[in-house]
C-alpha cells in the first residue's frame, strides 16, 4: 500500500516535469500566444538555501532556494511583466488604457527565511511582494500541523494514533511508510474539527515522541518584532491569512468572520498599516467557496487569492477576492519551468 502510494507520487511528479519540459520549448508556447493572459500571481512559502536532502521530505514542495527565486524574478522581468503589489492588481487590470501584463509575488505563513533570504532578492530587483501572516503562528498559539506531523513521522518507527476509527498502530520503518503516515495525518486534519485534529497531533507529539510543536513554530516563523522591522521596507506588504490557518469552508459563519476580521486587526498592529489583501488557507476548492469569497469581499479587502492555478484574466476583474495563483514548487526549480508557467499553456491544457 505504502509502496504503491510512493510509486504514484513519483509518477505524478514525473508527468508534471515532462509537461513542463514540453511547454518550455519555444515552439510549443508559440502555439498558444494568448494563454498567458495578463500575467500571474506566484505563490511561495519557504525561501532558504538547499537543505540536506533526505528521502523523507513531505513538505519539500513548499521550499525553494534563493537562487531559484532570483531566476523566477528574472524570468518574469525578461517576459516583459511589470511587478506590482497584489492589492494593486484589481485597479490596474480595470484601467482601460493600461494593456501591460503583471506579476505579483506572494509568500504564505510568515516564515523567518522570507526576511532573511527572499527579501534581499526582491530588494535587489526592486520587486514588491506580499507576505500573508497567521497571528496564531506569530504569537505561538497555533502549531503548524504539517511540520509537526512530518517531525513525528521522521522520528518514529511506530506511531500509535486514533485517526477516527479507534486506536491503531502505524509502522513507519521505511521512507514509503513514513510518507503514508504523514498522509494519514493530513487526511485526518480535514476529516474532523480542525482545532481538535491539530490539538490531538500536538498532544501525541509532546506526550509520546518528545517533540514540541511550538518550538517548531518558533524556529520557523517571524515574531511580532521581526514583522515590525520587516514592514519598514516599503516593498513588502503584510496581508491577512486568518488567525489559525483553518479551512474556512469547514467553519461556522461566526468563526469565518472572526478569522477574517481578527487577523486583519492583528496584522495591522504588526505592520502599522491595514492589510489590503487576503489569502485563503489551503486555497483549494474544498477550502474556498462562494461564502468565503463574499465574506472577504464584504470585509473590504482589495484582493484575495486561492491556490487554484491560472493566469490573470477577465475573471479576476469580476471576482478580485478569488484570484488564482501559480505555485513555485520546490520539486520543479528550473528557470525554464518558470517560463513555461508564465506562458499560461499548462493551465490551458489542464
Image (spheres, rainbow, N blue to C red):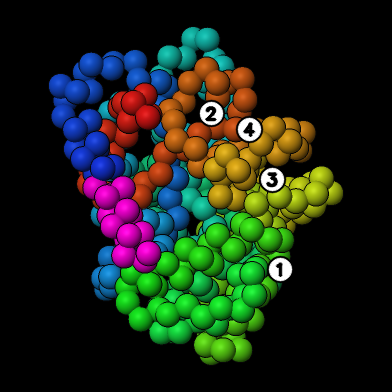
**Which residue is tagged 2?**
89
* Residue 140 visible: no
Given this view, does label 2 or label 3 mark the residue nearer the observer? 3
Magenta stretch bounds: 1-14
Label 3 neighbour load within 10 Å: few <14, some 14-19, many 20+ = some
In the picture, the quarter occupied by the C terminus is top left
Label 1 secondary element = helix
Q: Position of residue 248 (x, y in %)?
A: 69, 48
**Which residue is tagged 3?**
249
**Which residue is tagged 4?**
321
Point out the tag, 4 or 1, that comes first from the N-terminus. Answer: 1
Instruction: Measure the C-alpha gap from mark 4 to mark 2.
Output: 11 Å
Which secondary structure class fits the magenta region best? helix
Decide: marks 1, 2 in contact (CB < 8 A)? no
Q: Nearer the viewer, residue 309 or 16?
A: 16
**Which residue is tagged 1?**
196
Instruction: Measure the C-alpha gap from mark 4 to mark 1.
Output: 29 Å
Q: Position of residue 308 (x, y in %)?
A: 49, 37
* Residue 3 visible: yes
**Which residue is depicted at the point 23% across and 16% down?**
31
Given this view, does label 3 or label 4 mark the residue nearer the observer? 3
Amino acid at each position: 500500500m505504502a509502496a504503491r502510494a510512493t510509486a504514484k507520487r513519483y509518477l505524478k511528479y514525473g508527468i508534471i516535469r515532462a509537461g513542463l519540459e514540453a511547454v518550455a520549448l519555444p515552439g510549443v508556447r508559440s502555439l498558444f500566444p494568448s494563454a498567458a493572459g495578463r500575467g500571474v500571481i506566484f505563490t511561495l512559502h519557504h525561501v532558504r538555501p538547499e537543505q540536506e536532502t533526505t528521502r523523507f521530505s513531505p513538505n519539500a514542495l513548499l521550499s525553494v532556494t534563493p537562487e531559484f527565486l532570483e531566476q523566477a524574478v528574472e524570468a518574469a522581468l525578461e517576459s516583459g511583466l511589470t511587478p506590482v503589489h497584489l492589492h494593486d492588481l484589481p485597479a490596474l487590470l480595470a484601467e482601460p488604457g493600461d494593456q501591460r501584463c503583471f506579476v505579483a509575488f506572494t509568500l504564505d505563513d510568515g516564515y523567518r527565511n522570507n526576511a532573511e533570504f527572499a527579501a534581499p532578492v526582491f530588494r535587489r530587483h526592486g520587486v514588491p511582494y506580499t507576505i500573508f501572516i497567521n497571528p496564531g503562528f506569530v504569537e505561538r498559539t497555533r502549531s503548524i500541523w504539517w511540520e509537526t506531523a512530518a517531525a513525528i513521522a521522521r522520528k518514529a518507527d511506530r506511531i500509535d494514533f486514533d485517526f477516527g476509527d479507534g486506536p491503531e498502530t502505524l509502522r513507519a520503518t521505511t521512507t514509503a511508510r513514513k510518507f503514508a503516515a504523514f498522509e494519514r495525518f493530513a487526511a485526518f486534519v480535514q476529516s474532523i474539527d480542525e482545532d481538535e485534529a491539530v490539538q490531538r497531533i500536538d498532544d501525541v507529539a509532546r506526550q509520546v515522541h518528545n517533540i514540541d510543536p511550538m518550538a517548531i513554530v518558533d524556529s520557523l516563523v517571524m515574531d511580532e518584532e521581526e514583522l515590525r522591522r520587516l514592514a519598514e521596507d516599503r516593498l513588502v506588504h503584510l496581508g491577512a491569512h486568518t488567525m489559525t490557518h483553518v479551512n474556512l469552508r469547514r467553519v461556522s459563519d461566526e468563526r469565518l468572520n472572526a478569522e477574517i476580521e481578527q487577523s486583519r486587526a492583528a496584522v495591522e498592529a504588526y505592520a502599522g498599516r491595514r492589510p489590503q489583501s487576503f489569502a485563503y488557507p489551503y486555497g483549494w476548492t474544498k477550502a474556498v467557496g462562494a461564502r468565503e469569497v463574499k465574506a472577504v469581499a464584504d470585509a473590504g479587502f482589495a484582493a484575495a487569492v486561492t491556490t487554484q492555478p491560472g493566469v490573470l484574466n477577465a475573471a479576476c476583474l469580476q471576482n478580485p477576492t478569488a484570484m488564482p495563483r501559480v505555485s513555485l514548487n520546490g520539486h520543479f526549480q528550473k528557470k525554464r519551468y518558470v517560463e513555461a508557467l508564465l506562458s499560461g499553456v499548462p493551465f490551458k491544457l489542464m
